Amino acid sequence: FSDNEEAMKSVDEIMNEFFSPGGWSKCFDNIYAIEANIPKELDLYIPAAQEELYNWVNGPNRQFEAAFRVIQSGEWGQYDGFYLMEGDSVPVKNYWLDVILGEINEYRPFAVLGAQYDGDKWDAFYEQIPISLLHHTNGNG
């Protein structure tokens, strides 16, 4: 994102909000902006093509994979877990983070914890979807 002025501006706004009084810094010790470096041809998010293109959502999936690899590398510190919330997700429940922490404590140990997609938008091409995508965790994992 460092070559994209709009992306840099968005990251700056997020960082400023995080550290503002009453911001998310009350919940988390720090925040990092780390590039996923997804090749342009793999960075797909085309909701309009979800009926005919099985990998229309490849970009967010590769973003999750890249985030996991960064955490796994230890380059940004040593962690025993992380929470990825997709950029278009908006918490609507009070104390939602407490709920997530409670579920983590209830279900540990686990490799990946989150909800599985349960919609009907894939029905038209369900048979063409690879098994790895059929059982993926949805936007918050």
Image (spheres, grey):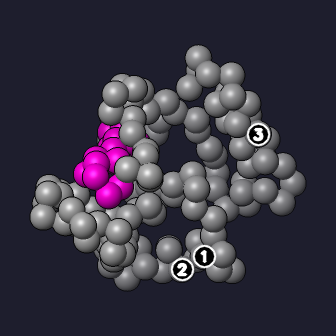
The residue closer to the viewer here, 59 or 67, is 59
Category of crowding for the residue at label 3, using alpha-carbon neighbours closer than 10 angstroms: few (below 14), some (14–19), many (at least 20):
few
Residue 9 shown left or right of residue 48 in the figure? right
Can the viewer see residue 48? yes
Q: Do the residues labelled 3 and 1 touch (CB within 8 Å)?
A: no
Callout 1 amino acid = Trp
Kindly identify the residue that appears in the image at 64 percent across and 56 percent down.
28
Residue 13 numbered mark, or none = 3
Residue at 76%, 39% in the rendered image: 13
| Side of 88 where 103 appears, left or right | left
What's the distance in space between the residues labelled 3 and 2, CA to CA?
Answer: 27 Å
Q: Which of 32 and 124 is in front in this view?
A: 124
Q: Whole-Å distance between the Cαs marked 2 and 1? A: 5 Å
| Residue pointed to by mark 2 | 99
Q: In the shown orientation, is residue 127 left or right of residue 97?
A: left
Query: Is residue 111 among the parts visible in the rendering?
Result: no
Residue, x 36% and y 75% (percent of image)?
A: 119
Judged left or right of residue 11, residue 73 is: left
Q: Which amino acid does label 2 sit on?
A: Val
The label number, if any, that marks residue 96 in the structure image: 1
Image position, residue 73 (x, y; %): 33, 35
Crowd class of label 2 (few under 14; some 14 to 19; many from 20; radius 10 Å): few
Quarter of the view holding residue 92:
bottom right
Going from the N terminus, do you reach mark 3 or mark 2 first? 3
Q: Quadrant of the C terminus?
A: bottom left
Q: What element carries label 3?
A: helix
First to last magenta residue range: 50-69
